[in-house]
Image (cartoon, rainbow, N blue to C red):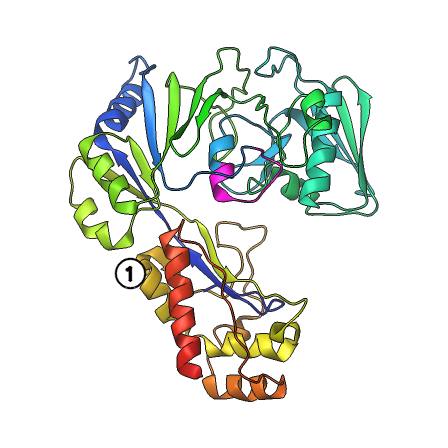
Amino acid sequence: MLKSKWVWSLALMSVPMVLASCSNETESEDASSAEGAEEVVGGTFNYGYGTQPEVLDPHFTTAGATRDLVRPMYESLVTLNSNYEVVPMLAESYDVSEDGKTITFNLREGVLFHDGEEMKAEDVVASMERWHEIANVLPESAYEVVDPYTVELHLEERNNSALHLIADISQLAGIMPEEIASNAPITGITEYVGTGPYQFEVWHQDQHVQLVRFEEYTGVEDEADGMAGQKNAYVDEIFFHFVPDSQTKVAGLQTGEYDLISYVPYDTYEMLENDDSLIVHTMPSGMEFLVFNKKEGIFSDTKARQAFNMAIDKEPVMKAAFNYEEFYSMEPALMIPDQADWHTRAGEEHFNEYDPDRALELLDEAGYNGEEIVILTTRDYDHHYSVSVVVHQQLQELG
């Protein structure tokens, strides 16, 4: 479980399973590791993906489905390497003024959009202004065109997290042509033109999204490192097949219909781990958390939120959702230890304060009188739904 000392909410770290078919991956690994061997290039990559995105607009939402599908298409000025450090991507370099109020981005020249036009400062400013408005990031800031390959970000005051926010992939600050960014409808863009190694081909609702290799892609030559460095488009095309049923995804991988699936049912772990035709990967994913409606209702009262936090026994929640201890972490930090610049154990003394009796006292002090409490959740992700079900059960048991 992860919980900041400043936020009264339930937050828990999860680790998803990703499965890959051995056949294609083994060929690629052998080709890239064998000295002097040619890389395997071409073919189709089929990804069994559990959720269809509402939009393919990188600025529009923090939804994981949008994030995962747009990352091959769009790039940002800066990104994060494997140590979660900010490094240039579409920017050749960046400079921070002595007072920290101006960040200058020196753009790479010759970067092409999928429509064949070169990326210029005007495109960057239009894209960043739109991202800034929609994502509500870095308030009281402004972007300025200095020359065709230089952009300045002006901050009202020093913000040491500004570059990390721009590099974050959860609501990607993707760069798109000025005309698209400036004229985008309020419901999100419908022309998907970025600078990434793959370009949009077609979206068949409830079936798949198809991306194809962008032959004019101009990436960096540094070794791949986290989200930074080289992006080699080995396959001709990528299909994101929308498969909401988890068991259907697993069956499709086993039969070879899919090369990769993610968010695998945790109760299938042992079976899949023992299947020699599959490779199982695990990686840090994110947090399980409940967000309160603090604007109205019982949880507008701080004591009610404190009561909720003390009413939930978090470890049984995580065990029910993830089945195996290796797939979740019970730590006091909001950030994982790998995020060295941000990880802290401050507030550890308030970690996992499970106290049902005190919870009832706080609810009484908050004036709770049996009003209905609604938990809004989703079936798109099994673990999110399981967490909600167990939390619901625990609250009912408390009364």
- Residue 278, percent from left and from top: 21, 37
Q: How many marks?
A: 1
Query: Residue 304's x, y, as percent?
Result: 59, 78
Q: Position of residue 156 (x, y in %)?
A: 84, 45
Image height of 74 relative to 365, above or below: above
Task: Give neighbour class at mark 1: few <14, some 14-19, many 20+ (Cα, 10 Å).
Answer: some
At x 42%, y 71%, the residue is 392
Whether residue 106 is visible here, answered yes or no, is yes
Q: Give coordinates of residue 125: x percent, y percent.
A: 75, 28
Q: Is residue 288 above or below residue 17?
A: below
Q: Residue at x 79, y 43 (%)?
A: 100
Q: Which residue is nearer to you in this view: 243 or 177?
A: 243
| Label 1 element class | loop
Q: Quadrant of residue 31?
A: top left
Placement of the C terminus among the 4 image quadrants = bottom left
| Residue at image coords 65%, 67% | 294
The stretch of residues the image draws in magenta is 57-67
Residue at x 54%, y 20% (from the top left corner): 220
Residue 256 in which image quadrant: top left
Is 308 part of what is drawn in magenta?
Answer: no
Instruction: Decide: is 68 above or below 34.
Output: below
The residue closer to the viewer here, 194 or 161, is 194
